[in-house]
Amino acid sequence: MRIRPAARAELARLQEIERAAGVPFRDVGMADVADDAPPALETLERYRRAGRCWVAADARTDVPAAYLIAEPVDGALHVEQVSVHPDAARRGVGRALLARAADRAREEGLTALTLTTFTEVPWNAPYYARLGFRTLSEAGLTPGLRRIRAEEAAHGLDRWPRVCMRLELPHSGGTSGRLSG
């Protein structure tokens, strides 16, 4: 897989990836998450224009198999979405996308990656914890993370336990977690 910026012509493919990545949620009793609509093309284009939409593309075909979108929130780069097509799962693709996001965060002088995720889904919070992310307490949430959590609750995502997580990024290369290794 090759990590690179998404092209405008690929945005519909990112929606396909999102739909396919949602299917496994049905197997853990989260059909509403599985059926949730992917980000709108306009939303994906906004991230792409800002230089914060990356894909993991097949080395031979250059067709995206995964993507990540992010935006700065309170001094950190917040991972809004990372989705891997099930055909490319369990191959380090998500980790590679997160490593690219960490590199971008450092380039922008940001100190961490943040994200919100489901606590009881194996490929969510437990996965991120293995990569070095730590769960933030309610008191540790920044105003921007509180806003994001409120938006998620309004969307109905709080039907299942969720947390905010953070990975500190040292300025001298590498990550404090396990993204690069």
Image (spheres, helix red, strand yellow):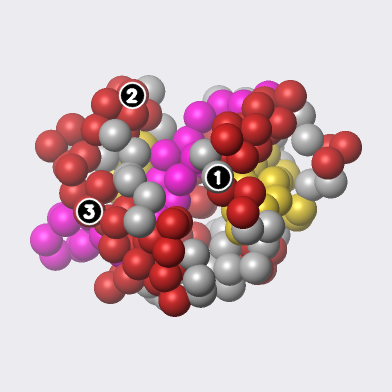
Which residue is disc 3 drawn over? 16
Which residue is disc 1 drawn over? 156
Which of the pair 93/82 is nearer the observer? 82
Q: Is mark 2 on a helix, strand or loop?
A: helix
How far apart in space, not on screen, are marks 3 and 2 (Cα)?
18 Å
Residue 172, position as x, y percentages in the image: 67, 41
Above or below 60: residue 151: above
Q: Which residue is at the far right?
A: 139
Residue shown at 43% from the left, 64% from the top? 31
Name the residue type under label 3.
Glu
The image quadrant where one finds the N terminus is bottom left
Write down the quadrant of residue 120 in the picture.
Answer: bottom right
The magenta segment: 56-85
Above or below 96: residue 76: above
Q: Residue 176 carries which label?
A: none
Please state if 15 lies on the left or on the right of 132 as rendered. Answer: left
Pointers 1 and 2 in contact (C-beta within 8 Å): no
Write down the quadrant of residue 35 in the picture.
Answer: bottom left
Name the residue type under label 2.
Arg
58 part of magenta stretch: yes
Which residue is disc 2 drawn over? 46
Above or below 82: residue 106: above
